[in-house]
Amino acid sequence: MASKNFFGILCCSAISAIKIGCFDSYFSASTLSALQPDSDRELVDVLLAHRRLNRGPKIVAIGGGTGLSTLLRGLKQYSANITAIVTVADDGGSSGRLRREIGVLPPGDIRNCLAALADEEKLLTELFQYRFQAGDGLIGHSFGNLFLTAMTEIAGDLEKAIAASSQVLAVRGKVLPATLSDVRLWAQLTDGRLIEGESNITEAKGQIHQIGCIPPDPPALPAAISAIEEADFIVVGPGSLYTSVIPNLLVPKIREALAKVNVPRIYVCNIMTQPGETEGYTVSNHIRAIDRVCGKRVFDSILVQRTSPSPQSLERYAQESCHPVFLDREEVANLGCRIVIANVMEEDEVKGYIRHDSNRLSKILWRWYSGK
């Protein structure tokens, strides 16, 4: 009871802080200035932009981890009718602790997606990503995870908590968990080991032969199925293949709905391989892995990075057994999948990372969809 009261107080404080930090600044900086006599043009531009976004296509993005939030950050510039369907299989870090200690579904990936879709993204991301450095029981927790945990206890379940949070945070679109079941991943490795737990799978440093979850057939969130059925455009990925993308497809109704819809569906392939998940994988290996789980194809096309990272980045990543995902064109063609090749990479040689660029990625996806 004490923890519930603590989280309730924290949630109320969070709402007040966000309203002051985000909404007040938004209206004072944007709306009020637009209402000045010499700012009529600005007001018209704002209204037209909102009208355009609200009339945008219904886009469904499926995944988890940082890959999905990166995608959403760019897509929200093209449509406000976005639904992110997010895995709830995470059991590491702050999310894992809250899952074990409080009994809530892991909020981390959902937190990242809410921040990415919020109007005041920069401020909200800083707030939600803030990790406590002191305090008994608080060290290591992110503020956003605690906020969503409190909202879940107050609202009754994660779906209601996300809906309430989305209103407070002025989120463009919706964020939905793939299931409300307490899902736990397992993987059978090629060396015979059976690994349980999402965080343990990558740490095992083996090659995945088969993947599943407990319970084996978790029920889908009805709103997620409705979003897929009503979608104009569906994007799967980017993100860790076995621990961010595939967990959503382990929900039977989700993969069945994806296979049935007759709209453009594209899979965004990772740029680099990932030790413990996709070491040595080519593009066709990614396709086959998803096909094995789904039993049928759930996307029509695949987006692949065009250019290779710099020699310095390649050397650095090679030290961790990471390499560019090789495009084996003939194999992909034999699988009947259309290839979309584009430069969607962001490379920071100073910080030493390679990832998808949200603006480039969303622009290419928008052009691809518009050309269908």
Image (cartoon, helix red, strand yellow):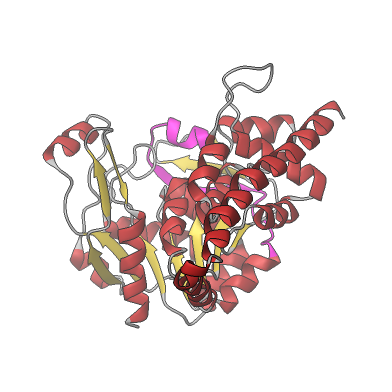
Residue 175's image quarter?
A: bottom right
**Residue found at the far left of this picture:** 311
Residue 120 x/y as whole percent: 53, 51
Q: Is residue 113 visible?
A: yes
Q: Where is residue 252 in the image (x, y as percent from the top left)?
A: 60, 63
Find the magenta span and give its range: 197-221
User: Left or right: 134 with respect to 338?
Assistant: right
Q: Is residue 5 above or below residue 251?
A: above
Residue 136 location in percent, x, y? 69, 16
Residue 218 within the segment the image draws in magenta: yes
Location of the C terminus (image quadrant): bottom left
Determine whether, in the image, residue 250 is placed left or right of residue 183.
left
Q: In this view, does 68 lie above or below 353?
A: below
* Image-quadrant location for residue 3: top right
Residue at (48%, 36%) from the top-left corner? 201
Question: Residue 154, located in which quarter of the rendered image?
Answer: top right
Count how many numbered circles sit on residues in the image: 0
Q: Where is residue 270 in the image (x, y as percent from the top left)?
A: 33, 52
Q: Nearer the viewer, residue 184 or 81?
A: 81
Residue extending farthest front:
37
Tell me which residue sits at (47%, 67%) in the image: 39
